[in-house]
Amino acid sequence: MTQQSVAKFGLGEVVRHQDATFRGVVIDIDASYAGEAGPATGAKPDQPWYKVLAIGLGGSFIAYVAESDLEHDPELSALSPEAEQRWFTVDAQGRHAPLAHAIH
C-alpha cells in the first residue's frame, strides 16, 4: 500500500526557509523528492518538496526545498509591491499565482 502525504503549503503561499536565508512563493509541489541525485541537505526524500520562487540577499532564484525546511512566513512580505504586481495576482488569503494562472 502506498503512503500518501499531504502538503503543508499550497501553491502561491508565501513561505520562508527555517534558517531565514530566504523568503518566497511556492510555485510547484512534488509528493516526494524528485531530483536526480539524493537530497544534498540531508532532508528525508519521502516528504513533500517544493519549488519556491525565492527572494534572498543576492536576488531571486528557484529553490527546491523539503517541507521540513520551510515554515509559513508570518510577515507575508516576501515580495515588494512592484514585484507582486509584475508577476502575480494575490487573493484575499495572501496566496500568489502567476499572472497567467488562476489560483485554485
Image: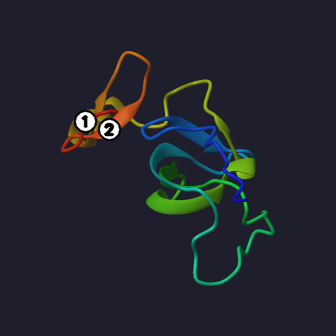
Secondary structure at badge 1 equals: loop
Using the numbered discs, state the Cα–Cα distance from disc 2 to disc 1 in whole angstroms.
6 Å
Residue 69 is situated, as x and y percent measured from the top left of the image, at 73, 51
Residue type highlighted by circle 1: Ala
Residue 54 is situated, as x and y percent measured from the top left of the image, at 49, 52
Taking the spot 24% from the left edge, 33% from the top edge, the residue there is 85
Q: How many numbered discs?
A: 2
For the C terminus, which image quadrant?
A: top left
Residue at far bottom of view = 37
- Asked whether 44 or 53 is in front, the reply is 44
Please name the colour scheme applied to the rendered image. Answer: rainbow
Residue 18 is situated, as x and y percent measured from the top left of the image, at 73, 45
Number of residues whose C-alpha sits closer than 10 Å to that of mark 2, classed few (under 14), some (14–19) or many (20 or more): many
For the N terminus, which image quadrant?
A: bottom right
Along the horizontal axis of the image, is 35 left or right of 2?
left
Looking at marks 2 and 1 on the same chain, the residue that comes earlier in the sequence is marked by 2
Taking the spot 65% from the left edge, 84% from the top edge, the residue there is 37
Number of residues whose C-alpha sits closer than 10 Å to that of mark 1, classed few (under 14), some (14–19) or many (20 or more): few
Residue type highlighted by circle 2: Ala
Q: Where does label 2 land, which residue?
A: 97
**Decide: marks 2, 1 in contact (CB < 8 A)?**
yes
Picture quadrant where residue 86 is located:
top left
Picture quadrant where residue 79 is located:
top left
Taking the spot 23% from the left edge, 42% from the top edge, the residue there is 101
Label placed on residue 102: 1
Residue at far top of view = 92
Mark in front: 2 vs 1: 1
